[in-house]
Image (spheres, rainbow, N blue to C red):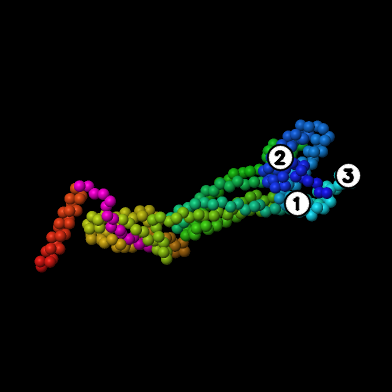
Amino acid sequence: MIKSYYDILGVEESANKTQIKNQYKKLVKIYHPDINSSLEAEFIFKEINKAAQILLNDKKRKDYDLLRKNNKKIYRPSCNKYSFDDLFKKTKKEENKPIKGDDIFVSVEIDYKEALLGTYRVVNIANSTICPKCQGKKFANNSICSYCNGVGEKIDNKKITVKIPANLKNKAKLRIKNEGQKGAFGGKNGDLYVVVNIQPKDEFTIKDGIVYVEVKISPYTAVLGGNVSVLTLWGEATIKIPPLTKTNQSFKLVNVGILNEKTNKKGDQIVTLIVETPSKVTDEEFRLYEKLKEINQKKKNAKIIN
């Protein structure tokens, strides 16, 4: 029957890579030749190494599980036995062929204004490469590789500055070539994919390429007129409103809207003024409003007499 590499390592068939690695490290500490010099330990050490090589390799483990499922007699405990390696000659021959690195996916958040104008984000990625000392074998000089601690991989953390173009849509995916996981045996690197999440818009509304914004003004500003600060995509601007401005009255600002990358010109912004009723007034302000009411009432009465 098929040799059970799961039994050799003492793990369940459903064990993940982390569980297999941890169990393998425990057994190495018991049966490594530098620790245990018995012939039995030497045999067991070879067995657990072989088991780990199979179960920690996704393709080999998949093929191995399939063979177990088909219940083929691939192992005979005798001097004429042939090993599990014989079943993977093709795989071994292909091990040194170029292998493309895996793609990496990260996500970033930007606000609505940044989505319209474009921005930059710095992303941190962890890139793994085959250990240069043990070449992924996990052992060097008959002991656990000191460079990678028996993992077989070297992890490098890297910061990459990503340019996020203007007028980007939510959940857009940016591709940065060759910034994914490193390829093996001369294979190409994978790619880095950056998913851009745009936070809900706040002050601005965009329709047909025009920016709309509402600005609240006080009653006395609406009556007397004056300068009003307005937020634009490019900072604050000041508009001068005339006396007796009504609520919902709109004004157009030019060259402060969305930048057209083809023409390199900015669009328009429409500012709608909302006359805001104060939530609190002082006693003096209240008396002044009463005075205004009296004056307004006299004006109405005078119109009726005329």
Residue at the (15%, 63%) spot, across then down: 300
Which of the two labelled residues, at mark 1 and mark 3, occupies the earlier sequence position?
Answer: 1
C-alpha gap between disc 2 and disc 1: 19 Å
Q: Is residue 217 left or right of residue 148?
A: left
Say whether residue 178 is visible. no
Badge 1: residue crowd in 10 Å (few <14, some 14–19, many ≥20): some
Estimate the x, y position of residue 28 in percent, counting from the top left.
Answer: 74, 37
Residue at the (22%, 47%) spot, across then down: 282
For the C terminus, the quadrant is bottom left
**Element type at marker 2?**
helix
Residue at the (78%, 38%) spot, across then down: 45
Q: Which residue is mark 1?
A: 65
**Element type at marker 3?**
loop
Q: Which residue is mark 2?
A: 23
Q: Is residue 210 left or right of residue 96?
A: left
Estimate the x, y position of residue 301 in percent, counting from the top left.
Answer: 12, 63
Which numbered marker is on residue 37? none
Whether residue 269 appears in magenta in the rendering, the answer is yes
Q: Which residue is mark 3?
A: 78
- What is the magenta range? 266-283
